[in-house]
Image (cartoon, grey):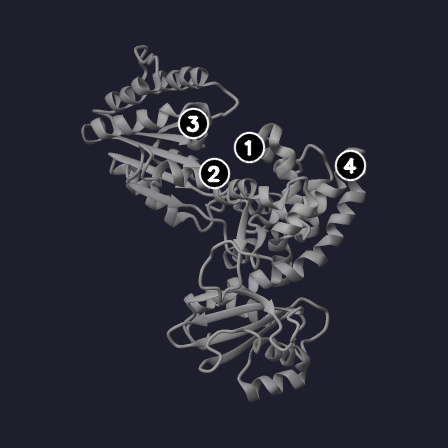
Amino acid sequence: MEIFFDRERELEGLIADIEKYKSLIVLYGNRRVGKTELIKRVINKIGGIYLYVDNTKSSTLLLREFSQIIREYFNTSLFNPPDWDLFMKGLFELSRNRQTAVYFDEFQRFEDINKSVFTALQKNVDLYIDTSRLSIVCSGSSIGLIKKIFMDISLPLYKRATFIMHLKNFDFVTSYKYLRISIEDAIKMYSIFGGSPQFYKYFRLNSIKNVEEMIKNIFLSSTSAYVFEPRDFITEEFGRRSQTYFSILYAIATGNTRVSEIANMTDVKATSLQPYLFELRDILNLITYELPVTNKNNKIDKKGIYKLTDSYMEFWFGHFYPNMNQFELGNYRGVVNSLIQSVDAIAPHKFEEICRDLIIYMNNEKAGIMPFSIQKVGKWWGRNGYNSAGKDQEEIDILAINEEKKAIMFGECKWTGRPGDISIYEDLKRKAMSVQWNNKDRNEYFILFSRSGFTDKMKAMAEEDNVILFDLDRIESMLKK
């Protein structure tokens, strides 16, 4: 059960829908989120046929291989369909009197292998799902493609799914509870490896104690499964076009987050970047587009920035990729030392994201801590309202709002070795005046997070001004309750 930590609800839900039969189930989520492990657990409990859609194979070869698996499962020599339409029809016919579950892993790859599979599945679902005891599970890692295949009104499988499950990475709270290490080590670990269950399983199975050991385990050998995983994934997805995507991901991972900055780091003009960004954002979900949280619309404009959604890929492109030449020369220890040193540079920025996760957790799970019900939380950046030239930019780590109550909370996150002092609070209040949101009629609140606690003066002022303070001890105590 340890491998499926925090997945019992998904496991039970998937099994329940499969056992209804007459089901077409869609399971999607990012790489390393545990889709295949979840399917394996389902198969161990209720059985079924696992079919992996390998995009290095032709449609004819896959049809032949899948047909062989079906023949063996049903113990028949008569299943030899010449095309995908008859393959799907045959599955329904063989399952008329026998409850059967078939799992297509990486189903979206049929988009490149043979699109007629989608029409074949739709046709046979419409004709035979009510007279068969078959359930079909289609899983995939290309979130945009899976959504398009099953949710685009113009495509054949629109509205055919009976159950759709989006399997997500662990949030920080879940990751911390799984890791069973100190809150500081958990924050560092999450900063590098995000909420990927696959990494946490590796962490526990190898009895690793902290992020430094984890980095050594992965990067002290060229044979580690994770060393070249981002490179191999991008190469598999984009083939000959991979180099452009490598350049874009490297640019974003190293802090070049605006379109003009990305263009300057690549060989692609700013006016030609959007198709590449679309594929990375809307098809593979590798990057996300962010605007200040107070923005009313989410349309792309000059204020927006791009960020990688996967912490390990951000770490890999931002810190390992520039050192790959040294790694290829066998300087493993030198590269590992450099990667370990980079943790201290990465953690302060990731601490901001973790604190926003904690705000959501407290809002949903810990009544009474947040001063109001939060509808939206994120980051804010914009012009300093007190600079007449409009050149100075301000950033606020956390901004949470409730439109109806006109309530707004400003937050600062400090990952330093010094206790938070009054100056942090005073600076946050100054920056808050630049946020143009119900300025004449709003209720303001403040929250501070600090790795190293707070000075006595700051604690006294917090009591006086009703400022919420969180150090690591208080975070840890809250998560253990």
Q: Earlier in the sequence, mark 4 or mark 2?
A: 2
Is 215 left, or right, of 448 in this rendering? right
Q: Which of marks 2 and 1 is nearer the N terminus?
A: 2
Amino acid under disc 3: Phe
Query: What residue is disc 2 on?
Result: 142
**Residue 3 x/y as whole percent:** 49, 44
Q: Residue at x 66, y 62 (%)?
A: 348
Alpha carbon distance from label 1 to label 3: 13 Å
Query: What residue is disc 3 on?
Result: 110
Q: In which quarter of the image is residue 15?
A: top left
Pick the quarter of the image with the N terminus. top left
Q: Are marks 2 and 1 in contact (CB under 8 Å)?
A: yes
Is 264 left, or right, of 142 in this rendering? right
Is 441 drawn above or below residue 164 in the view shown? below
Query: What residue is disc 1 on?
Result: 237
Amino acid under disc 4: Asn
Amino acid under disc 1: Glu
Q: Is mark 4 on a helix, strand or loop?
A: helix
Alpha carbon distance from label 3 to label 4: 36 Å
Q: Examine the rendering and report whether any part of residue 333 can be seen.
A: yes
Q: Residue at x 28, y 19 (%)?
A: 90
Is 399 drawn above or below residue 302 in the view shown? below
**Residue 181 x/y as whole percent:** 60, 58
Q: Which residue is drawn at 77% across and 49% down?
A: 338
